[in-house]
Amino acid sequence: MLIDYHVHTSLCKHADGTPEEYVEMAIRNGISEIGFSDHCPWPVGFDSKYRMSAGQFPIYRKTVSDLKKKFHAIKILYGLEVDWVSGRMEEVWRNLENEKFDYLIGSVHYTDDFPFDNPEYADKWNEKDFIEKVWMRYFELLLEMVDSGKFDIIGHFDLPKKFGYYPKSMDAISKIVQQVFKAAAKNRMAVEINTAGLRKPVKELYPSLEILKMAEKAGVMLALGSDSHTPAEIAANFAEAVKHAKSAGYSKVCSFDQRRPTLLPLG
């Protein structure tokens, strides 16, 4: 079973193609389920250059609803990628409380005020001790996010490696990763294998095999996502993702319906 749950739309201002083209590509690629998970517009003003506005959100909702009615050869799900913005999440939940999502992806793209995965700010990675600070703060925020119990999938787990910068030692990181996975297993969350890393400077899947093995050992479920921003990226490198998953000990993948996970055979 191949399922792509990390798919964007042009509403995010940095994706191309029509939603219909994404679905048609998924059907051609033999994907069983496609989930749209564009960037949440709340909190208002947060990273507004790279996401829909609050006023556009009804368009997004209707777009996915219309796709479900139009296409019957594939299961289409209504999701959202929600950034963990520490101290401002009440605004997010207040605006989402009446939405009938199939799943929510929780992601961290900022360590406080630093957009660490944005290439426009990549030079900051060369500052003294910056790598260690960003990696540790990222996982502190990720732990907050997972502990909240508000999400279904952890998006692109080790995203700080995007430009190929790693801490000198992963010992402290590994300890907090174990805490994250303990909380994720308790809250019935899945960790995503995100293939976009293969299209970035690091040229690696998110997360690394070592981290994915830790997730499997902790009893964390698995999800798949291409992080598509063009129709051509739907299910990109899923063969590698399946091999990655099986190398870590996974044999099943999550399918969601109204926030309820079901485990299906992988591949």
Image (tube, rainbow, N blue to C red):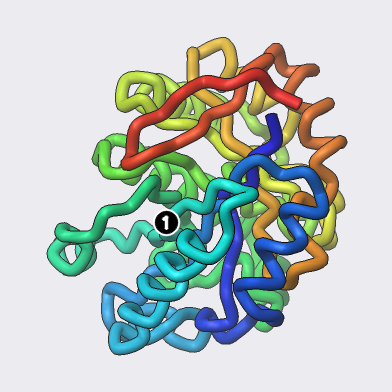
The image shows a total of numbered marks equal to 1
Identify the residue shown where x is 72% and y is 18%.
248
Is any atom of residue 67 visible in this view? yes
Eyeballing the image, is 129 above or below 12?
Answer: above
Q: Amino acid at mark 1?
A: Tyr
129 and 263: which one is in front? 263
Viewport quadrant of the N terminus: top right
Q: Position of residue 250 (x, y in %)?
A: 67, 16
- Left or right: 129 as drawn, with respect to 203: left
Residue corresponding to mark 1: 78
Is any atom of residue 141 visible in this view? no
Q: Position of residue 48 (x, y in %)?
A: 42, 85
Identify the residue shown where x is 37% and y is 47%.
102
User: Circle 1 — which element?
Assistant: strand
235 and 193: which one is in front? 235
Q: Position of residue 215 (x, y in %)?
A: 56, 22
Identify the residue shown where x is 61% and y is 48%.
74
Q: Quadrant of residue 99?
A: bottom left
- Left or right: 169 as drawn, with respect to 62: right
Q: Quadrant of residue 10?
A: bottom right
- Left or right: 179 as drawn, with respect to 124: left
Identify the residue shown where x is 72% and y is 57%.
162
Q: Position of residue 151 (x, y in %)?
A: 34, 43
Viewport quadrant of the C terminus: top right
